Amino acid sequence: MFLQEENKKLSMDNFIFPEKLRSKLQFLIDNPEKMPRVLCFYGNPGNGKTTFAKYIASKISKEVHYYDSNSFKMDGTSSSAILKSINESYRTVSIYEFVEGNEHLKDRSFNRAFIIDEFHNSSNQTQDGYKIAVEEISKTGSIFIFVLNTDEKETYEKRVTPAMRSRFYDIKFDLEDYQINEVCELVKKKYPQVPNETVRELVTANDMRRLMTEAKILG
């Protein structure tokens, strides 16, 4: 899927991150020239990885291409179809920045951002199939953001091949124990309608998606 424009409703204020993670992510946004060309966001489901990947991609690149590995499986195709699409995309000349009203895109640091979501559902062979692509295409003014779910049993090291780990600049989105109180306080300020015990339960579980659902239900 080609995401044509930035979601203007989003800002860093929409994300509830501990200060350590927030500072690292904000540095990348503010200094795209220093940004690694192959990022990997990992952690528990529901903690904002995919939403933030789309947000940062739309801030720094002229075009954002999003791929859900699960969707390709459901369609009966393999992840090789994602690679084929990426290869075709980066070889074409982008004219989107020249469309009237898109003048602001000319100053973006990257031509294209490729987001590959649910990367943990790709086989080891498929994962390693990205090796050459990320190395070659990232040299052409493009950036990759891989997103995957991990937990205590299915760790980052288990779910990503050594070859791909060596190419990733990985960022963990899960909270450390010492950050739980900090984030609970942030949540209470943003969603005062959510009971304290529910806040602590969901923050401890790294489930911000469910927490936001609770906040909407409670108004």
Image: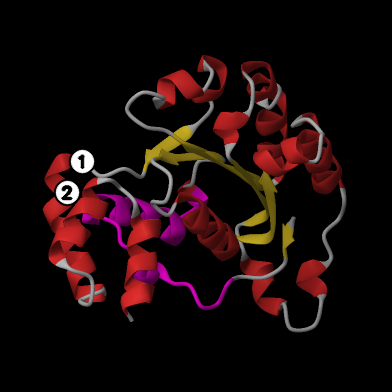
Could one spot residue 15 in this view of the protein?
Answer: no
Place residue 72 in its image quadrant. top right
Residue 216 screen position, x and y as percent: 38, 75
Place residue 188 in its image quadrant. bottom left
Q: CA distance from mark 2 to mark 1?
A: 5 Å
Q: Which residues are magenta?
A: 7-33
Quadrant the N terminus occupies: bottom right
Residue 54 screen position, x and y as percent: 56, 58
Residue 104 screen position, x and y as percent: 65, 76
Is 14 rendered above or below residue 176? below
Does the stretch in magenta take in 27?
yes
Cβ atoms at labels 2 and 1 below 8 Å apart: yes
Q: Residues within 10 Å of mark 2 (few under 14, many from 20)?
A: some
* Label 2 residue SS: helix
The colour mode here is secondary structure
Q: Residues within 10 Å of mark 1 (few under 14, many from 20)?
A: few
**Observer-nearest of 16 and 103:** 16
Q: Residue at x 69, y 46 (%)?
A: 67
**In the rendered image, which residue does mark 2 sit on?**
179
- Under mark 2, the amino acid is Gln
Place residue 170 in its image quadrant. top left
Is 93 rendered above or below residue 45? below
**In the rendered image, which residue does mark 1 sit on?**
176
Q: Report the number of numbered marks.
A: 2
Residue 92 screen position, x and y as percent: 87, 50
